[in-house]
Image: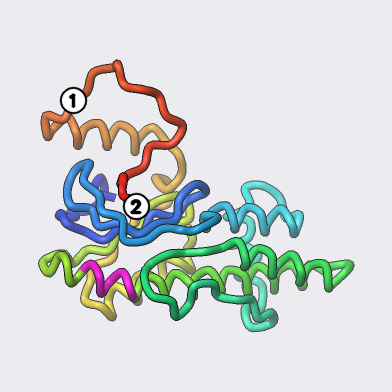
Amino acid sequence: ARLSADIQFPYLLLLTSGGHCQVLAVEGVGQYRKLGATVDDSAGEAFDKVAKMLDIGYPGGPNLEKRAVLGKADRFSFPVPMRGRHGCAFSFSGLKTAVRVCIDGLGQMTETDKNDICASFQMAVVAQVRDRLNHAFQAFRAAYPTGRDLVVAGGVAANKTLRTALKEMAQANGFIFSAPPIELCTDNGVMIAWAGMERFCQNMTDTLDFRARPRWPLDTQP
């Protein structure tokens, strides 16, 4: 996001993608403090798996979002996991299960059914993000009183409904909302190059004798 906007440290980050869903305080280049993360699935994984259940094609997340525009978000009452709980943790496994139960109950689905499920599911995801971020705003402001930027990053950051909700929340809480351009929200070489440049400018260089790891956490807190 710092490639396309003048975002100063520290800032509040919602990282949401196929592999991640967490809220972090970004204190500087390579300096992260985790405020909360998903206890099971990521938001992006939930989008893709629900799209697969509905057989609406790949890429699942964008196709689900297109369908949601055509559907009625109030037709199905899906649960909003973690709502009302303390902290900033997320959970999407139960929501996916609720969608599966709904699909099984409908039997032969129509295109209208699929659109309404997409809209109702997306609304439940956004509702959970709203609830979790309310706690994150409070925690971040208490620890970093000078920080005023809310940044969303990751593949799910391309979802326009989520962006609209985050922008509204940021304004209501006195934050400035920033998101990368849509074309920079997918896996791409630009984000890798930018991260390297940010570190290089801080004289943060590394040798090549590190141990390879399939996942490298931003924050090593448990």
Residue 214 rendering spot, x and y as whole percentages:
46, 32
Q: Position of residue 210 (x, y in %)?
A: 31, 21
User: Is residue 44 part of the magenta span, yes or no?
Assistant: no
Give the vertical position of 146 relative to 30 (above or below). Answer: below
State the mark number for residue 75.
none
Q: Which residues are magenta?
A: 135-140
In the picture provided, is 132 more to the left or to the right than 28? right
| Cα gap from disc 2 to disc 1, whole angstroms | 26 Å
Q: Residue furthest right?
A: 108
- Residue 137 magenta-highlighted: yes
Question: Left or right of 163: which side holds 202?
Answer: left
Q: Which mark is residue 180?
A: 2
Q: Quadrant of residue 162?
A: bottom left
Please identify the quarter of the rendering in which residue 148 is found. bottom left
The three-letter amino acid code for the residue at tag 1 is Thr
Tell me: residue 37, above or below residue 172: above
Using residue 1 as the reference point, say whether residue 184 is left or right of it. right
Q: Nearer the viewer, mark 2 or mark 1?
A: 1
Q: Residues within 10 Å of mark 1 (few under 14, many from 20)?
A: few
